[in-house]
Image: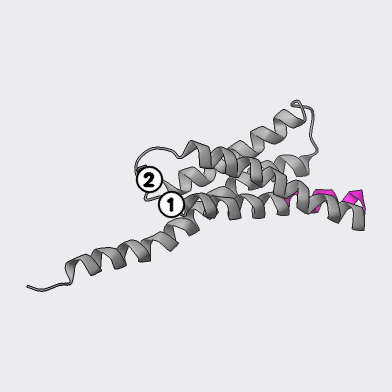
């Protein structure tokens, strides 16, 4: 399967789902330990971190469009949350968390691209070395 060009939708959808699961897994213990008021701080931080990490995972096998894939991870995670809450009203901290999901995904895509760049340069350079 070629990794260049198109969007890797299966990975994006899976990463968005896993990001939302990770946010819940991070936020629930914090709220149980420190009280419900911590959700306004924990949810945005967990949203940023989860989408960042999963966008890096998505980018591991990509050759291009790293940031786009990361943004899509954040968008999918946001849409999953909105679907779970049936589009109900949300506190401002959660709206900020949705923006941070997209930002975290974009940043993760950027990091994935930076990680791939040295490997691609090494492969190109190695291909040029050889007997004359």
Residue 61 falls inside the magenta stretch: no
Quadrant including the C terminus: bottom left
Look at 85% across and 54% down and name the residue there: 29
* Residue at numbered disc 2: 3
Query: Residue extending furthest left?
Result: 132
Residue 41 falls inside the magenta stretch: yes
Residue 98 point in image, percent of width and height: 67, 41
* Residue at numbered disc 1: 61
Label 2 Cα neighbours within 10 Å, binned few <14 / some 14-19 / many ≥20: few
Asked if labels 1 and 2 touch by Cβ distance under 8 angstroms, the answer is yes
Figure check: 78 above or below 58: above
Relative side of 56 to 117, left or right: right
Quadrant including the N terminus: top left
Name the secondary structure under disc 1: loop
Name the secondary structure under disc 2: loop
Residue 37 point in image, percent of width and height: 89, 50
Figure check: 41 above or below 69: below
């Amino acid at each position: 399967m070629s990794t260049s060009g198109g969007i890797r939708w299966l990975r994006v959808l899976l990463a968005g789902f896993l990001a939302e699961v990770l946010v819940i897994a991070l936020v629930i213990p914090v709220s149980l330990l420190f009280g419900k008021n911590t959700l306004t701080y924990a949810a945005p931080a967990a949203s940023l971190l989860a989408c960042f990490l999963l966008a890096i995972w998505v980018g591991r096998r990509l050759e291009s469009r790293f940031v786009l894939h990361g943004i899509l991870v954040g968008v999918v995670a946001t849409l999953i949350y909105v679907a779970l809450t049936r589009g109900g009203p949300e506190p401002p901290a959660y709206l900020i968390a949705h923006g941070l999901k997209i930002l975290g995904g974009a940043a993760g895509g950027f990091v994935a691209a930076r990680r791939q760049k040295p490997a691609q340069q090494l492969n190109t350079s190695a291909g040029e070395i050889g007997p004359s």
